[in-house]
Amino acid sequence: MDPVLTMPSSGFRSGPVLSLIECVERTDQGTGALICETAGDRLATVLLEEGRICWAVASGMRRRLTDLLLETAPRPLERNELERIYRDCKGRNVPLGEELVRLGVVPPSGLRDALAQHTSEAIVRVGEADAVTFGWVAHRAPGYSPKFTFETLDIALRVADKVYPAAATEGRRVLQQSGLPGIAFRGTDEPDGGAFPVAATRADELPDGDDLTGRGRLFLELRERIGTVGGETPDLVSWRAPQGHHFALGSHGDLTIAHFLSQPTDLGRLLKARMKT
């Protein structure tokens, strides 16, 4: 994987995070670690298995994954008990979180939320750094259960809730009003930025397949489509993607909304919903 450079800046920028996501999407080496560095120092590590994000950690994070897991435990768990389980997991080379679920210490939903929270916080740190580069280290990680791994879109939306809360709220409102599956994107004036996803509805109904994998390549395809429009997004335009899927792209204030059309009547339904806004 070739290194990807971002433009120096301050505060959170979507560009480094979008570059990270594209590295995840475009690598053929789906199991290993994506290493994020700035000024020659390791900034963050994103662990992948079969192209899906398992979890991430970044320097300077206030809470460890174990802290989040302790918060989700339905019964009080002493840290020394957690450390004992951790040492046992390390010796047997099994994921700590999944072992805690197996033992009944943490509920499955609690583990998934803790992993997503920790990972999105780490990736926010990437967006706050200057001149980030990415490298790849292939390895065989312990076999993570797919239900505790994430598509790129999952994590991007978690990041958006942290850094673009107003846009995320508005995006959910517009999408829910349409009643159609889709993704809301926030535009950016950053030279290295682009359309950043802030909300999605009925994501499990969005098309998937060999060309739109579970990693989230639909998300990349829609971003690329928005980029080809040029200038301001049209009020509403419908098109058929190369894979044969139908979408409608429209603007709502600072947001660009991509709606998936699965029925011939969906476009008319969408037009009626827009007339009410």
Image (cartoon, rainbow, N blue to C red):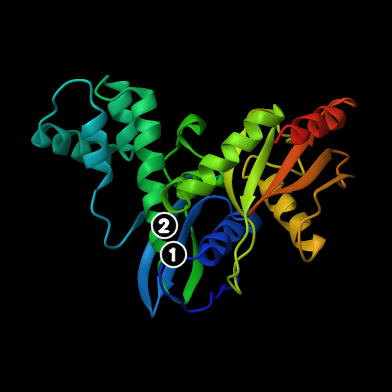
Residue 147, position as x, y percentages in the image = 49, 30
* Image disc number at residue 12: 1
Front of the two marks 1 and 2: 1
The answer to whether any part of residue 41 appears in the image is yes
Report which quarter residue 273 is drawn in.
top right
Q: Secondary structure at mark 1?
A: loop
Q: Which residue has dot 2 on it?
A: 124
Above or below: residue 131 compared with residue 90: below
Q: Residue at x 86, y 25 (%)?
A: 263
- Three-letter residue code for mark 2: Val
- Three-letter residue code for mark 1: Phe
Residue 160, position as x, y percentages in the image = 49, 49
The answer to whether any part of residue 240 appears in the image is no
Residue 111, position as x, y percentages in the image = 35, 31
In the rendered structure, which disc, 1 or 2, sits on the residue that comes first in sequence?
1
| Contact flag, marks 1 and 2 (Cβ < 8 Å) | yes
> Front-most of 103 and 237?
237
Q: Residue at x 51, y 33 (%)?
A: 146
Report which quarter residue 202 is drawn in.
top right
Q: Label 2: how many residues lie within 10 Å, few (<14), some (14-19) or many (20+)? A: many
